[in-house]
Image: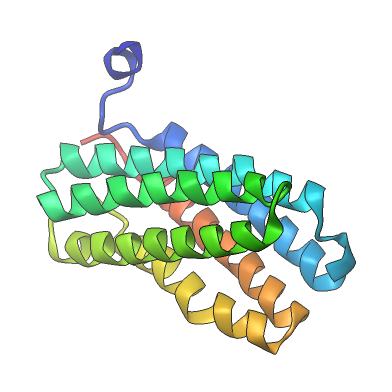
């Protein structure tokens, strides 16, 4: 409640900042995995957790902005689903410390759910009212589905390289949120 009183729903710059931070973390993790796959272990998986939660927070901010500019209900719902899926994606990475095999299935499902939700939201944003970063949202949704599974099938370098670039798409989305001005 206090946050709403201090920062109107249209002020999403703090959410942009946390999205950029999460994107930088994932980019660095992807580069580490690409350069040294043996470094991917408990610390790597545990570090994904806060990054994913930062992404979820950024999506909450994007949803607040979408609501404030009159975006469609489909956009609002898709962003809520994406935020919840991203939270579960992060928690599944924590579960990897206990049961890696099950966790890989879980975070794969939640990544796809988040990505599809971002694609749905982005299509509505591009077709809806101005003031929403539709193209950055679309890139953030399309990239992991289009590249991470293929990269994993090809080997460590393309897999973790795709993860690093996914981090960059989150940085771009965060910067787009930072650039939004209050209406």
Q: In this orientation, which residue lies closer to the viewer: 39 or 101?
A: 101
Residue at x 33%, y 14% (from the top left corner) = 6
Query: Where is residue 28 drawn, in percent x and y?
Result: 73, 57
Q: What residue is drawn where x is 17% and y is 37%?
A: 68
Q: Is residue 165 above or below residue 153?
A: above
Seen at 46% across and 63% down, the residue is: 109
Q: What residue is at 89 percent from the left and 66 percent from the top?
A: 38
Q: Quadrant of residue 168?
A: bottom right
Q: How is colour applied across the structure in the image?
A: rainbow
Q: Quadrant of the N terminus?
A: top left
- Left or right of residue 115: residue 97: right
Q: Position of residue 36 (x, y in %)?
A: 87, 68
Expressed as whole percent of the image width and height from the top left, the position of residue 12 reads 36, 36
From the viewer's perspective, is residue 69 above or below residue 1? below
Numbered circles on residues, count:
0
Say whether residue 75 is left or right of residue 107.
left
Quadrant of the image for the C terminus? top left
| Foreground pick, 42 / 12 | 42
Indicate whether 154 appears above or below 54: below
Residue 104 at least partly seen = yes
Q: Is residue 132 left or right of residue 86?
A: left
The answer to whether one can see residue 168 in this image is no
Residue 63 x/y as whole percent = 28, 42
Side of 164 relative to 69 (left or right): right
């Amino acid at each position: 409640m206090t946050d709403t009183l201090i920062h109107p729903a249209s002020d999403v710059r703090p959410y942009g900042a946390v999205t950029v931070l999460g994107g930088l973390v994932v980019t660095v993790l992807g580069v580490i995995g690409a350069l040294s796959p043996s470094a991917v272990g408990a610390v790597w998986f545990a570090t994904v957790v806060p990054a994913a939660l930062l992404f979820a927070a950024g999506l909450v901010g994007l949803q607040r902005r979408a609501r404030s500019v009159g975006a469609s209900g489909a956009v609002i719902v898709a962003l809520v689903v994406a935020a919840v899926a991203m939270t579960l994606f992060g928690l599944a990475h924590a579960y990897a410390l206990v049961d890696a095999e099950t966790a890989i299935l879980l975070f794969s499902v939640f990544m796809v759910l988040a990505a599809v939700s971002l694609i749905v939201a982005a299509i509505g944003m591009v077709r809806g009212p101005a003031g929403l970063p539709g193209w950055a949202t679309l890139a953030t949704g399309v990239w992991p589905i289009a590249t991470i599974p293929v990269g994993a099938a090809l080997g460590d370098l393309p897999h973790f390289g795709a993860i690093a670039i996914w981090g960059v798409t989150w940085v771009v989305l965060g910067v787009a949120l930072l650039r939004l001005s209050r209406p």
